[in-house]
Image (cartoon, rainbow, N blue to C red):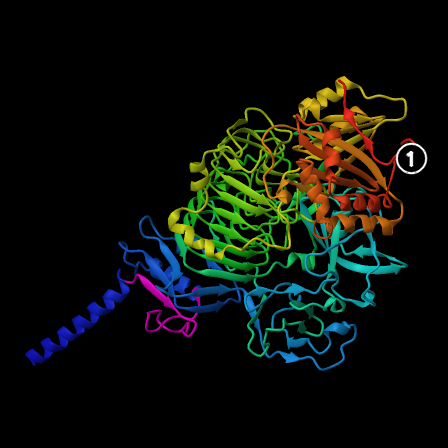
Amino acid sequence: MKNSTGKIFLVFCCTFIVLCSNCFGQISEVWVSPTGSDSNTGTKEQPLASPSMAVRKVRELRRLQQTDPSKSVHIYLSSGRYFLEEPIHIRPEDSGILNNPTILEAAPHAQVSISGGKAIVNWKLLKENLPFLPQKAKGKIWVADLPEGISLGIRQLWVNGKKATRAKNTAGIEMQRILSWNKKEQTCWIPAPKEAHLEQAKGLEFFIHQWWEIAQLRVKRIEVQGDSAKLTFFQPESRIQSEHPWPAPWISKETGNSAFYLCNALQFLDEAGEYYCDPVAQKIYYFPFSNENMLQTEAIASHLETLVRIEGTPEKPVQHFHIQNINFEHTAYWRPATHGHVAHQTGMPMTDAYNLKIAGTPEKQTLENQAWIIRPTAAVSINHSQNIHIQNCQFTHTASTGLDLYKGVNQSLVTGNVFKDIGGNGILVGNFSDEATEIHLPYNPTDLREVSHHIQISNNLISDATNEDWGSVGIGVGFAHDIQITHNDISNVHYSGISVGWGWTRHITVLKNNLVKANKIRLYGKNMYDVAGIYTLSAQPNTQIIENVIDSIYRAPYAHIPSHWFYLYTDEGSSFMTIRDNWTASTKYLQNANGPANTWENNGPSVADSIYQKAGLAPQYQSLLRFANPYDARYDINIEKPVIVELVTAQGKTLDKEKLKVILGKSKISTSSVYQWQNHTVIFDKVQDVYLLQDRLKNAFPDVKIKTYHDLFYEFNREKCGEKKKEGAWKHILLTANLVADPNKQKAYLDAHATQFEKWPEVSKGFCNADFQQLLLFRNGRQLMLVISIPAEADFEKLNPRTTLNNPRVNDWNKAMKDYQEGLEDAPKGDTWEFFKSFEF
């Protein structure tokens, strides 16, 4: 009995000890697997099925003090894709402690995806005769049922990992131009669509490009009248779009009206890679590429807007929570489907906006408008949290923001992540105005716990972001302080790379002490202008923008002002900042309505090579570059070119030379850049901000006609001669003429110049022989401006005959061009081209 009892006692003790080791102070791992069960224990052998249940289990373990205080608690996700039906909520009770964080991460060597999408399955070739389906699509369309739970349709679809296009009325990157906008009626006139019966299309949407932002409006009614159509929109976006002044639809004879396209109608489903969703019939239709087998294709539609929500309170923040090595993907953004999307800046949708009938507010006496915004959704959203680490993750296939560190986030780290195929902003930090706060008001909250600060954003790769809301940015910082943005690589964004600041104010706020250093920004400004690689707003004491590299801005095809792009741009109220040692391809910068005490030092292409080489991802993170999208060959790269601004006075009137000299000085333009013929005065130079120059000229000379020549449609340079341009100064010969009124001949003239180098190579050979360094040909309407640049010491009258020397084909070219050209209305009879002379001050 004694031995037996002792034996039983020992077994009982051992069992108790084993249980203790699992229950009191020993558990530091919880495992999850797509093949697990939430009724399991959460061990590696018996994993849970959902990350949310794992978070709950760790919460309970910490509550019961059943974790080892000397170890971090790991939630390990095994390989696979985890489809969520609701966000993973991280609460204050899920906090770790110093040196013992809670870590949500992929298991060692695992490939993990957390998805907010729903799989589209059981595709079938469409055999029925679907009304309004385009003829070219018949026999090629595949159809599937919508998954359960998708009531608003599908706004994003990824087929084999590539985002498909919602069926639209233009091909590829092409857009059309609006005809007019009636703000009083809240209507827009467009060219009549070629597709029939659009008035019967349910869910038709209108996407419009306007300055530095876009808007998406739900079409209530379309009325075709001859060659035009009138669009009426649903509320509230109809009112906001027509009442807000910035940015508004652009109407310009010089640069073209705002570009647009229509989307989300079956009539538009005519191109491979497009889809149309019919939420009434609960069907989705897809036009596959020739190499896509729909029986083996993975198709995932967006569903959830947010995947992880880390949410504390000012009194009880979430602390010491880390997320590592996880891919977050397939998020939606539903507001455009329910309210439309009229964005103000940085992708912030407006809830109200209008012009002030009488300008001025207590904070800003000249303010002429008011606006209120809300925040776009994010795949991972963080509020009132401390010591949060987001490391080595991927944010891909999102409809809106990737990562948002909103209010009360501090002492946190975002490093080594990839942001790719992001519909909105890559990363947002800080408050950009509360919903109840007008956007121009300074932000100085009574409770400073609301402010985000001391966050390091480093060594992240952001590529192909902002691809739905083109006015979003790679990294955006609002009212926040001590934010370090260092060594990030940002490329292929549609607007600015990095934006810091909000409020359009010179008032001192919580915005201060931010550092933007050693980032590499390239291939930006893909569609929007009023843009920069790095952009700032408002007073920011001790903010430093240093040692960044900014290069290669796209030539946006529908920019409101084609020259309104910059490498560095300190906008309204920017004050007390240092901008130093930034490498840029030229010094095309803008300082617009800045406040005091900004320091600009040593910026431009002459910055040291050592700074250039160190910018971008640090060596240990450069493997992330394999995820970067390459240059998009559908777009050209902008090279800084001079522009021409022409002032035409009434006959017999002259310009006030002193006024003109003052404007040139303010705009940093040399007086030697001004030329004159009769009552035509021309400024030809590289102008940092032609828009601002135009405004200054209009204010100084209200009775003068001012024309800007943005359309540079022909360029010859010494590369055509197989050599570089000569060193030294140039002088410029400026001439002007008109195209004939016949539109067909105008087109023939432009086509001839577009193909001249291929079909008439003798012409450029003649320019080479004449030692011409450059020829630029601009157009504004019918009027042409030709600029011939030659070495400063040369004589044009002696060089010009060399173009035809032993080269009779040049005479043939010149003779052919005479059929398309004529003199200006006020030119002497029989003259075609008129020469400008240097303006005499």
The relative height of residue 207 versus residue 148 in the rendered view (above or below) is above
Quadrant that contains the N terminus: bottom left
Q: Position of residue 731 (x, y in %)?
A: 68, 28
The relative height of residue 564 versus residue 241 in the rendered view (above or below) is above
Farthest-out residue, front: 806
- Tell me which secondary structure the magenta stretch mostly adopts: loop
Q: Is residue 308 left or right of residue 13?
A: right
Give neighbour class at mark 1: few <14, some 14-19, many 20+ (Cα, 10 Å).
few
**What residue lies at 46% left-to-right and 49% top-to-bottom?**
460
Q: Nearer the viewer, residue 684 or 532?
A: 684
Per the image, is 29 magenta?
yes
Q: Position of residue 314 (x, y in %)?
A: 47, 44
- The magenta span reads 27-51
Q: Position of residue 190 (x, y in %)?
A: 82, 54
User: What amino acid is found at the position of numbered circle 1 in the picture?
Assistant: Gly
Q: Describe the element under mark 1 as helix, strand or loop.
A: loop
Q: Nearer the viewer, residue 354 or 542?
A: 542
Q: Position of residue 262 (x, y in %)?
A: 75, 59
Q: Is residue 205 visible?
A: yes
Quadrant that contains the C terminus: top right
Residue under label 1:
830
Q: Is residue 648 left or right of residue 334?
A: right
Per the image, is 412 magenta?
no
**What residue lies at 68% left-to-right and 22% top-to-bottom?**
665
- Quarter of the image for residue 458 reads top left
Q: Is residue 389 left or right of residue 288?
A: left
- Quarter of the image for residue 288 reads bottom right
Q: Nearer the viewer, residue 452 or 284?
A: 284
Farthest-out residue, right: 829
Q: Is residue 179 visible?
A: no
